[in-house]
Image: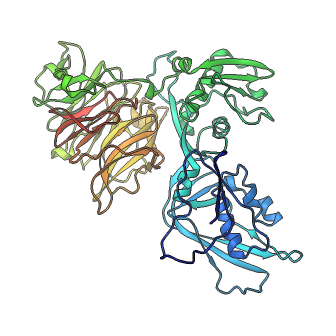
Amino acid sequence: MRTVAYAAGGVVLLAGCASMPDSGGLRGVESTPRQDPQVRVFAMPPGEDATPPQIVQGFLEALTSDDPDYKTARQYLTPQAAKTWQPELSTTVLSDGPEAYADPSGREDADSLTYTLSGTKVATVDAQQAYTPATGPYSKLVRLTKDTKDGQWRIDAVPQGVVMGKSDFQRNYMSVNKYYFASNTEGADAGAPPSAVADPVYVRSHVDPTTRMVRSLLDGPTTWLDPVVRSSFPTGTTLRKGAGSLTADDRGRLTVPLNDKAAGVGTGRCEEMAAQLLFTLRNLSPVVEEVELRAGGEQLCSLTQEGAETVATRGALHRPDHLYFVDGKHRLVRIAAGSSDPQSEPEPEPVPGALGEGDKALRSVAVARDERTAAGVTIDGTSLYVAPLVSGGPLGEPVLRSQGKTEKDRLTAPSWDAQGGLWVADRDPGNPRLYLLPEGEGEPLPVRTPGLDGRVQEVRVAADGVRIALVVEKGDRRSLLIGRIERSGPDGGTGGRTAVTVVELRSATPELEQVTAMSWTGDSRLVVVGREQGGVEQMKYVEVDGSTPDVPPPAALTGVKDVTASADEQTPLVAYSVDGIVRLPSGAQWQKVTEGTAPVYPG
């Protein structure tokens, strides 16, 4: 592969043919080495009298370029194939670049040849830009024909979508959260700001990502998330025809021209629309400090990043006040969150109320997101108690009991959602269930889990209240699954209360055989402790769609039993390991905090 670099423009051209070295040993190569993120890559068109192997190779290389509309790739196709090929339908990611094998029955003097593209699938990105892990072999046919007039070879049958190796995908694409609002939650205060929900998608990182993300946001949420979110943009809203590329001005102000479907919306709704845009573009384009929406020839509204945080709530906007854990006396205690100097750390203090000041021995705890109420599971795992964090308050009776015969067959650690609901799983083999106490009290509501195969071992609800992470055990395997929380009208099995169901569970860590601990961190990311088959324990970040974020993993830590993180990614990661409770400040190594077990941030 020839490469010509233009340093001033940051451009790399991919040639459509290969040169053969005349010395040196053999070595394996990936499809295209990782490039500097500022370098843009463009493919070379087919050369005169290019051979069939050069046409196929050139086409595959063109798929990995930064050509906005794949114009160069289409030059490798016949005119009819170029018209019918739809590269935006899907992206198939292979472990290595696709291999091309000629049909052994083809003759060199024939006017048509067939090649087979093959590889091992890693993931797919669909037409909605949603990422899904994939496995198994990839095999597709490509047919070439020779033009009878000029004798040039071109591809006249090609698979829809594009295909590339993992290294090329990592160079070409980036994961970005687009934001919608939770539509199917209960318990939120009337008049409270809507809760923003992250919907991760993949876009081509060097092909006008700002405009593409705005279009993707206007197109609506991905299929998986759609049932539990809403958009404030009126149905049918698109960018105004001829809007072109969207770019912020030198003051960080981005003007977004919309079609007439958005004309006439009220100020409140318009500001929600602008907040969706600002949350979506926050990490993609840090220079966007303000969004102005226009439609019908006039300004609808204008909103700044600071203003967006008052229009809607977002998990990552809330920094916890305290870190909570269980001390050596099995009481609920706390220390200030976020401190990075263990030498100046104050002594842990028991929380006010029965769980910190009483004598009930605890093994796991959870604190509501407003830090006014806490829940604790007794040391034998039998009973779940809920108590306000108010000095002198009574403990009361347990809100849930397990009939499991052993400690490992009883209650999991609980978790609070953003609306004050308390979630917990009973691991009793005779009656394994997931429960919700809508306001942390009253009769526990059994949560329906269609399609769940195995017993829930750990529960963590996202800050947005519409997604839940479950560690599920089946046989010798413990997997991390992400489910969507749906609420519907009462039925006969809920005693007249809202029915709650966790649906469409999907794996976030298909490569891990044993997941031992996990926690949400950020709006669509989790930190996970586990190991692959035959591997050693590792701690890593994963996205809810099963992809791996392009960020460094946490520093190695052995013997991890629990891990907790805040939705605010600036708050240090905390774990319980063989060294006690340890903390990982940004840019540092793990530091010993104190003795204790079961550390948790609110949530």
Q: Residue at x 61, y 56 (%)?
A: 91
Which is more toward the observer, 339 or 382? Answer: 339
Which is more toward the observer, 122 or 551? Answer: 551
Q: Residue at x 52, y 15 (%)?
A: 191
Which is more toward the observer, 431 or 470? Answer: 470
Q: Is residue 580 above or below residue 150?
A: above
Q: Residue at x 21, y 42 (%)?
A: 410
- Kindly indicate the quadrant of the structure image that contains residue 470: top left
Taking 359 as reference, is 432 left or right? right
Picture coordinates of residue 586 (x, y %)?
35, 34
- Kindly indicate the quadrant of the structure image that contains residue 282: top right
Taking 277 as reference, is 148 left or right? right
Taking 465 as reference, is 415 left or right? left
* Quadrant where the image shows the C terminus: top left
Picture coordinates of residue 587 (x, y %)?
34, 36
Taking 195 as reference, is 418 left or right? left
Q: Is residue 55 above or below residue 437?
A: below
Picture coordinates of residue 547 (x, y %)?
47, 49
Identify the image's colour scheme: rainbow, by chain, secondary structure or one colour: rainbow
